[in-house]
Every structure is written in structure tokens, then in C-alpha cells.
Image: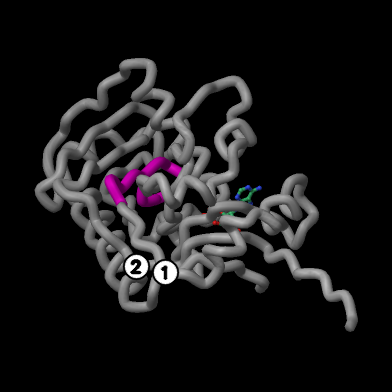
Amino acid sequence: PTLEKDIIPLYFAWFLAKHEEDNLRKTAHDFLEQLGNLKAFKKRLQAFGVEDKHKLDLLKYFAKAPNILHCTSKYCDYGKLPGSEEYAQQEGVKRSYSKGFTLHISSLFITPRTVGAQVELTEEQLFLWPADAEKEVMPKDTFPRGSRAHITLSTAADTQDVQTGIDLLELIKLQQTGKEGENVGEIFGGKLSYYDNGIWMLVLPRKKEVKTIFSGYYG
Ligand code: ACK
């Protein structure tokens, strides 16, 4: 028998089922449209680097959207990144591969760089979450495991997708230091908060469930 090595993907993730993806893209679109029209938003535009508040079209500003909506668990770069092989070999990862999972979206957030959905992982899903995912980008801070879990919805033209999870951690860090967002209204019946520096969060009135498949992306 030939010994074939498993091919390590670009990244492992929970991938949204097609109709869930369409639905979430529409939610993101409506969120940006409603936010962009709010007086409270138009009054707080400095961080977006636009002088004329009538010129900012959020749908154009966030010019890029991922081809496949997903929640990354481990970015491997085809095995080039440290720990990818170990991750790919984990019993839990192998067992979960190609299995269905329901993810829970608790809030939507935007910064001058990214638009994302915050994902609350269940105990079972946290088994698939790398222990160092948060430390990797913010080595000096301590976060509950899974804090970085998100779905990138769109980014500004010059921003990489990896920024969305970093922005989410920045936001959670603000919340951890006791900084309360300024409550500036409601969208979709959920509370909209402003945190300075162009950071906004909409806590959904109830968690949005999305059906996904855990798998690898090989590109
Ligand atoms: O939105 P994301 O989580 O951010 O999904 C994409 C996915 O991998 C494919 O590019 C994420 N990504 C890219 N680079 C990294 C990295 N160095 N660490 C963690 N996630 C990354 C990106």
C-alpha cells in the first residue's frame, strides 16, 4: 500500500450552507443600509475618514465580501503555519470533518475596516477551537476561549479578511475594561452601541442560528 499523507487545507472552518449564506448576506446588507441612514451614525463618521457625510455609502465603502461565508477555526496555509499538522491530526477535527453544526450569531459589528458577525461557540464547537487562537494575535491580553470566533461579512477595499477577528478582539477588550458602548438606538429590534474609533456593535434581540458544515478549504 502507498502511504499517502493528508493534504492540509488553506484553512479549516464551519462553512455556511448556501441558503444560510444568502440569508446572512442580505442581513449584512440591510444592517449597513440601516446603519448608514441613522442620524447617530452620520454624526460619528470621523473614523471613516470622510469629510462629507453625504458621501459615505457603506455598501460601497465595504467593497469586498468573502466568496464563501465561513467561521475560520484554524488557518493553516497548507501546513506552513506552526501547529497546523497537529491540528489536522486531532481526533476531534477528524471526527467532525464534513459534519453539520449549528452556529449561533449573537451580534453584528463594524469598524472602519471590517464588518463581521460574532459567533458564540458551543462546548462541542470549542473542541475544534485552537487553544492559542486569541494569543496568536493579542499575546498580551487574556480572552475567554473562542472570543475571536466570527464570520467576516465584508471589508474595506484595502483590508484583509484576517482583520475581522482582530477587530472583534479589540471590541471585546474594550468591553472587558468596563467600557460601555454608547447606546445610540435600535436596528432589527436589537441594541446598537458605539465604542469610539468608528467601532459599532449591534446585539441581536435573539441569537441567529446558521447551519454549517465543518470542513477544509483548499482553494
Ligand atoms: O475572515 P477570516 O477568518 O479571515 O477567514 C479568512 C480565511 O482565513 C481565509 O483567508 C482567515 N485568515 C487569513 N489569514 C489568517 C491568519 N494568519 N490567522 C488566522 N486567520 C487567518 C481569513
Are the two marked residues, 2 and 1, in contact with CB atoms closer than 8 angstroms?
Answer: yes
Q: Which stretch did the figure color magenta?
A: 105-118
Which residue type carries mark 2? Lys
| Residue position for label 2 | 211
Residue 196 percent across, percent down from the top left:
34, 27
| Residue position for label 1 | 100
Q: Nearer the viewer, mark 2 or mark 1?
A: 1
Indicate the quadrant where residue 59 lies. Answer: bottom left
Quick one: label 2 or label 1, which is nearer the N terminus?
1
Above or below, comparing residue 138 to residue 8 in the picture: above
- Secondary structure beneath dot 2 equals strand
Magenta-colored segment: predominant secondary structure: strand
Cα gap from disc 2 to disc 1, whole angstroms: 7 Å
- For this orientation, the residue located farthest to the front is 1
Residue nearest the viewer, comparing 166 with 18: 18
Q: Is residue 114 magenta?
A: yes
Residue ID at (89%, 83%): 1
Q: Is residue 65 visible?
A: no
Q: Is residue 147 left or right of residue 133?
A: left
Residue ID at (48%, 41%): 148
Residue nearest the viewer, comparing 65 with 90: 90
- For the C terminus, the image quarter is bottom right
Q: Which mark is residue 169?
A: none
Which residue type carries mark 1? Gly
Residue 132 percent across, percent down from the top left:
62, 36
Residue 82 percent across, percent down from the top left:
77, 45
